[in-house]
Structures are given as C-alpha cells and as structure tokens.
C-alpha cells in the first residue's frame, strides 16, 4: 500500500490553480517584483492581484491567476492563510531581490530549486505523485490520468486531464507548430532540466533517471535538509534509503540513481564544512548532523553554488 504525505487520511488532492498555463519565463520575477514593491503596505494582496494587475502584467485575468499560482508553489512568494498579505520569501529574495543571484534564471541551479519546490508541494498532487510515487520509466498521458483518477476517484476526469497536460508541458519540450502563436510556443524554463522527454510514440514520455551533472552540491544539500525537516526533524541521522527512495526525497524528486546519491553523500562533509557527515558505522548507511545544526540555514548551502559559478567565470 502506498504511504507518505499523499496517502494520509486527511489529505485533500489539488489538481488546479494554474489555469492550464505552464510556468513561463519571466513570470516569477514579475510576481516577485510586484510583491516586494508592496509588502510594506498593509493588506497588499489587492495591490498585487487586483483588477489593475491585468494592465500591469500585460496578460489576461486567467493568466494573472496562473502567474500568482506559480509564484506561490515555487516558493518565491508566500500568502499566509487568513490574511490579506503577500510576502516575498527567502528563496525569492535570493534569486530576484535587490542583490539577487539569478533574476533571469540563467543558472540551472535556480531551475533545480524551483523544480524541488514544485515537486514537493502537497498541493501539487500530480507533480508530487509523478516524481515520488510513479516508478516506471515511461508513461503515456492517458494512463497517467487513469492512475491518478483511480487514487482520487472523486475528482472530475477533465480536471485531472488538464492538470496532467500542464504537468507534461512544464517539463517536456513541445514540438513547434506553425499554427501556434509566438506566445503559445514559449517553453517552460523547466524543460531545460531534461527530466521528462517525449518518445517516438504519440503522447508517450519517459522520465530521465540518472546522474544530474547540472545539479549543484549546494542545491542538493538544501533539498536534503528540507526533506529531513519534513520527514524526521527530531532525528540526528537520516538513512540512505530515506534519502534515495522515500516520497519527497532528493533521490526521488531529482530522479537520481542510487550511485549518484551515494557519491553526493560521501562528499557531504566537505560541502557542508562538517555540519553534515556521511557514516557507514556498523553497516548503517546514514547522514549525521551536528548537534547544534539549524535547518533554517539550509538556503546558505544553495547560495554557495552561485559563488562557485561566479568564481569559475571570473577565473
């Protein structure tokens, strides 16, 4: 029987919010900029997403809703429940702030971080399920829809179909069509990660599992720590099996093979300045964290990837 966050008794699936539009280039920065301009105002939600947002962003009402959705689920902005406030997040500030390290998403580590956020959001049921529960290498659109509907039969098939379509377009590059307008042909930035690719058969795709050379060590550690805080925050150790195979784990979400996870963990003491270390004592393969470790510092490890990239470019 399936386990993990999506199969808890009180879990409520979500298959909407994006208005069928996949994430597009520029959207996250536009949303971040507007929120950062207004977050000192009380009740700034209306200032961000009110009627004048259509003119400000230069898109229709549904697309404004989609932009807002992606900015929230990508962890760039936050809308605290039971308030009329919208706030920028630490990740949003890191990427898009006044001294943002990658405002135009030119560094693939930024895309990996955004993918991590999307695929570990419980309110992105298709995303979470596809990366954390689906074990086959290939899939076709219809079978994916049927599998999701089997687990959540009370959701309308049309709703799941639209969500699956948006999911595929988020990650798989689409063939260009002379009939499509220029705006319709723009790819989602996450297609650059190459996580899902079409195969020769129509509407069939494959997950690209294995080594991810563009995934920085700092981004991996950040994801590991976020997973740890969610999975077992009180524990000072985390097993290799959990890191590689548990729903919502780095191994699952990044589609890493076992050897790549092991290689990354074996060097984790160097990457984290001994805040985390790899142990194989008594046959137990696990990561051990220092007693005074603070999970809230996780994003600092991701920042190191950008510093290393900058050093390589300047040398």
Image: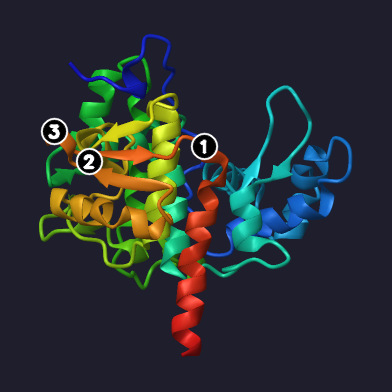
Label located before the other in sequence (3 or 1): 3
Identified at 73% across, 52% down, the residue is 54
Q: Position of residue 221 (x, y in %)?
A: 39, 50
Q: How is the image coloured?
A: rainbow
Q: Calculate the distance from the C-alpha at mark 3 to the C-alpha at mark 1.
A: 24 Å
Report helix, strand or loop for mark 1: loop
Q: Position of residue 134 (x, y in %)?
A: 20, 36
Q: Is residue 128 left or right of residue 208?
A: right
- Relative to residue 86, is residue 198 depicted above or below? below
- Relative to residue 6, is residue 314 depicted above or below? below
Q: Nearer the viewer, residue 279 or 178?
A: 279
Q: Which quadrant holds residue 194?
A: bottom left
Q: Is residue 91 visible?
A: yes
Q: Position of residue 241 (x, y in %)?
A: 20, 35
Instruction: Find residue 292 and name its label.
Output: 1
Crowding around mark 2 (Cα neighbors within 10 Å: few <14, some 14 to 19, many 20+) is many
Report helix, strand or loop for mark 2: helix
Q: Calculate the distance from the C-alpha at mark 2 to the C-alpha at mark 3.
A: 20 Å
* Residue most extreme to the top: 9
Q: Is residue 4 left or right of residue 52?
A: left
Q: Position of residue 274 (x, y in %)?
A: 40, 52
Crowding around mark 1 (Cα neighbors within 10 Å: few <14, some 14 to 19, many 20+) is few
Identified at 32% across, 17% down, the residue is 7
- Relative to residue 242, is residue 64 depicted above or below? below
Task: Return the residue at label 2.
Answer: 244
Identified at 53% across, 61% down, the residue is 303
Label located before the other in sequence (2 or 3): 2
Question: Of circles 1 and 2, which is in front?
Answer: 1
Q: Which quadrant: the N terminus?
A: top left
Task: Return the residue at label 3.
Answer: 282
């Amino acid at each position: 029987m399936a386990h993990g966050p999506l199969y808890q008794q009180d879990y409520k699936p979500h298959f909407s919010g994006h208005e069928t539009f996949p994430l597009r280039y520029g959207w996250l920065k536009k949303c971040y900029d507007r929120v950062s301009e207004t977050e000192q105002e009380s009740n700034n939600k209306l200032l961000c997403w009110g009627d004048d947002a259509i003119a400000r962003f230069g898109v229709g009402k549904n697309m404004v809703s989609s932009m807002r959705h992606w900015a929230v689920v990508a962890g760039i902005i936050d809308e605290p429940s039971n308030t009329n406030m919208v706030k920028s997040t630490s990740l949003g500030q890191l990427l898009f702030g006044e001294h943002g390290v990658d405002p135009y998403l030119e560094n693939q580590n930024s895309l990996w971080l955004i993918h991590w956020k999307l695929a570990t959001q419980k309110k992105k049921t298709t995303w979470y399920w596809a990366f954390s529960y689906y074990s086959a290498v290939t899939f076709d659109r219809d079978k994916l829809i049927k599998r999701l509907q089997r687990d959540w039969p009370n959701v309308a098939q049309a709703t799941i179909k639209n969500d699956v379509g948006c999911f595929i377009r988020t990650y798989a590059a689409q063939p260009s069509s002379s009939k499509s307008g220029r705006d319709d042909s723009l790819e989602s930035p996450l297609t650059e990660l190459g996580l899902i690719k079409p195969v020769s058969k129509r509407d069939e795709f494959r997950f690209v599992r294995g080594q991810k050379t563009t995934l920085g060590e700092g981004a991996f550690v950040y994801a590991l720590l976020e997973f740890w805080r969610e999975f077992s925050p009180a524990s000072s150790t985390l097993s290799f099996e959990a890191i590689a195979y548990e729903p919502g784990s780095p191994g699952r979400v990044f589609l890493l093979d076992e050897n790549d996870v092991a290689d990354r963990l074996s060097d984790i003491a160097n990457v984290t300045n001994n805040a985390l270390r790899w142990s194989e004592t008594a046959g137990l393969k696990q990561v051990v964290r220092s007693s005074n470790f603070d999970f809230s510092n996780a994003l600092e490890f991701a920042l190191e990837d950008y510093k290393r990239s900058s050093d390589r470019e300047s040398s």
